[in-house]
Image: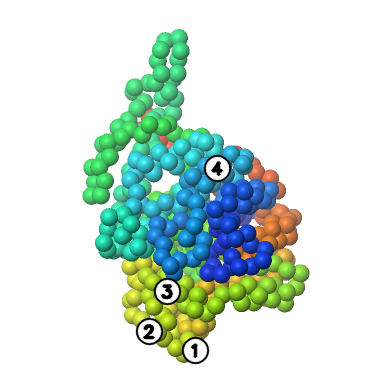
Amino acid sequence: MAKDKKIKFGAMIHGIGGTTDGWRHPSVPADASVSLPFYKERAKLAETANFSFIFVADGLSISEKSLPHFLNRFEPITLLTAIAGATEKIGLVGTLSTSYSQPFNVARQFLSLDHISSGRAGWNVVTSPSAGAARNFNGKDLPSHEDRYNKAAEHLRVVKGLWDSWEDGAFVRNKETGEFFDKEKMHELNHEGEYFSVKGPLNLERSQQGYPVIFQAGSSLRGKSFAAQSADAIFTGHETLEEAIEFYSDVMKKAEQNGRGHEEILIFPGISPIVASTVEEAHKIYEDFISLVPIDNAITYLGRFFDHFDFSTFPLDEPFPEIGDTGKEAFQSTTDKIKKMAKEHKLTLRQVAQQVAVPRSTFIGTPEIVADKIQTWFESGGADGFIINSDIPSQFKEFVEKVVPILQERGIYEKEYTGSTLREHLGIKKPSNQNSTNTALEV
């Protein structure tokens, strides 16, 4: 690790949270998921702590079993565009599916956000592992895991091609000569592929940072390969440092096989720190929060990852049931991890459901303990940064005010922004334009 390398942080903003019953807490605004002031306030708080970006997740189907936040929330690009006007530096990363969108629209939407925010946009590329989503977009069945990733790879190639429709300096805008643009610097894509046929060009020039930063969240074998080939940053999750190091090493090896260096891709495990003046108090905060979640709701939430499998027919206090390959076409890496956790730790169905519904953070304790663990993961090669989730009320503010200053004093986290674009925050180079005669990468 380079001596001057700094930890990067992103903030997951989830409205009323990613739990089944956290919205019931007295400190949680019950309408947070559809409250623009809430999102702006959270983004501004993250910006005061020099976070590289905020991160907005998404989904394309709901049912009566969905999490409360998912039942009633904003569409990410619309939300991030509104937040762009309330912030100055922080990056704006939103989720959008390649399975149920057209590349031309996606290219235009994210590049518009990138221009509006002066180069702060990022796209979290997902393949939507939900049968419900398929039924909302003229499909009866969920496409296979492999098919979704094949489509995603082509989708992303098309979007990047469209983002390069115009060479830098193409729009002359010379009022004296009447030349608005240089025709030689406009390029049609003329893509004909297995999934998409797109002529181009896009009706928008490249942005201040070239084009949006590409995030990817898949942790399956295919997901890691896709990310290693195409992503600038990876959102993942791990229970232990050993798992994090193994994942990091695997992705970097795959990146090297694709001709990419370690500096071209960053890895961000998601964590949910719980910070208090004592370790005992931190664990009490967790126990009080998880007590809000009835076991029936936890069981339902667990089934979500297995394509809404009904676990309610199994005994709660017996070993986690053998369910074969159920859910393998949905959240593949997540379901594999859940089954592995249950088997290795000999957990009951009740224990698994509670842990999945509200994971007990390994980043729990005093500000110094949490800072130590973050530093250890960073310096041991388990992460380039972290996406901070904060379902438990006040914990994001506690992290910003008590953990961040410790990391700054240790010299491993920036005390101020050193650039204005998301690529500059992350230390990722501006991509060259594939249609330009000047192919040198710009910083």
Question: Which residue type does callout 3 highlight?
Answer: Gly
> Badge 2 local density, few (<14 within 10 Å), some, or many (20+)?
few
Question: Is 115 placed above or below 323 here?
Answer: above
Residue matched to label 4: 82
Secondary element under disc 2, as helix, strand or loop, is loop
Residue at screen point 34% across, 44% down: 103
**Closer to us: mark 2 or mark 1?**
1
Q: Where residue 34 sits: x, y (%)?
A: 54, 53
What type is the residue that disc 2 sits on? Glu
Q: Is mark 4 on a helix, strand or loop?
A: helix
Residue matched to label 3: 303
Task: Give the labeled residue for mark 2.
Answer: 322
Where on the picture, by quarter, is residue 160?
Answer: top left
Give the mark, 4 or 1, whose residue is nearer the N terminus.
Answer: 4
Tell me residue 20's x, y (percent).
53, 69
Mark 4 touches mark 2? (CB < 8 Å)? no
Q: Residue at x 42, y 82 (%)?
A: 312
